[in-house]
Amino acid sequence: MCDKCEIGEYQNFDSYQTHDKFDLLLTQKQSKNIIIDKGFKNSANYLVCNYCNQEFFYSPPDQAWRGFFLKSENFIPPKDTDVTDKNKKVINWVIYIILVLLVIWLLN
Ligand SMILES: [Zn+2]
């Protein structure tokens, strides 16, 4: 981490205010092309510093999920993520189909 991308690390965001402050800082660094968003990797946003090539993984909080922002060396990738994601997609489709069938059944 260099002084340009110095932004701190969060094992989790303990409140929405903490995340709001962090998000503002990250947005500023992204708009100045200091930290570059490289897309999705290991179920998190993969970010790289344009100056020192420090890699970061970022997951924004969402309802009960508290998210994190960590240097790559402190980030432990979730195991079997691809399988979990695929299962989630299948479950979502099954729920969707059941809902559609329910609606059709109710309308009849
Ligand atoms: Zn840097």
Image (tube, rainbow, N blue to C red):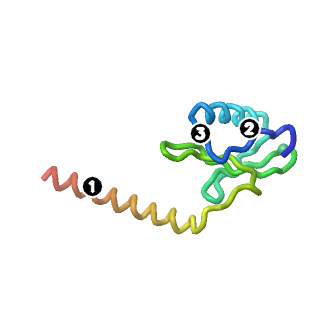
Dot 3: element: loop
The residue identified by callout 1 is 100
**Does the residue tagged 1 have its C-beta within 8 Å of any atom of ligand 1?**
no
Residue 17 drawn at (x, y percent): 59, 31
The residue identified by callout 2 is 30
Q: Tell me the crowding category of disc 1: few under 14, some 14 to 19, or many 20 or more residues within 10 angstroms, Cα based.
A: few
Residue at 63% in and 53% down: 44
Q: Quadrant of residue 4?
A: top right
Residue 100 drawn at (x, y percent): 27, 55
Disc 1 and disc 3: Cα gap in Å?
38 Å
Amino acid under disc 2? Gln
Amino acid under disc 1? Val
Disc 2 and disc 1: Cα gap in Å?
41 Å
Depicted 79 relative to depicted 55: above or below: below
Mark number, residue 14: 3
**Residue extending farthest left:** 108
Q: Quadrant of residue 28?
A: top right
Please indicate whether residue 20 sits to the left or right of residue 72 in the image: left
Dot 1: element: helix
Of marks 2 and 3, the one in the foreground: 3
Residue at 68% in and 44% down: 10
Please indicate whether residue 12 sits to the left or right of residue 2 in the image: left
- Mark 2 and mark 3 residues within 8 Å of each other at the beta carbon: no
- Which numbered disc, 2 or 3, marks the residue that appears first in the sequence? 3
Q: Tell me the crowding category of disc 3: few under 14, some 14 to 19, or many 20 or more residues within 10 angstroms, Cα based.
A: few
Residue at 87% in and 43% down: 2
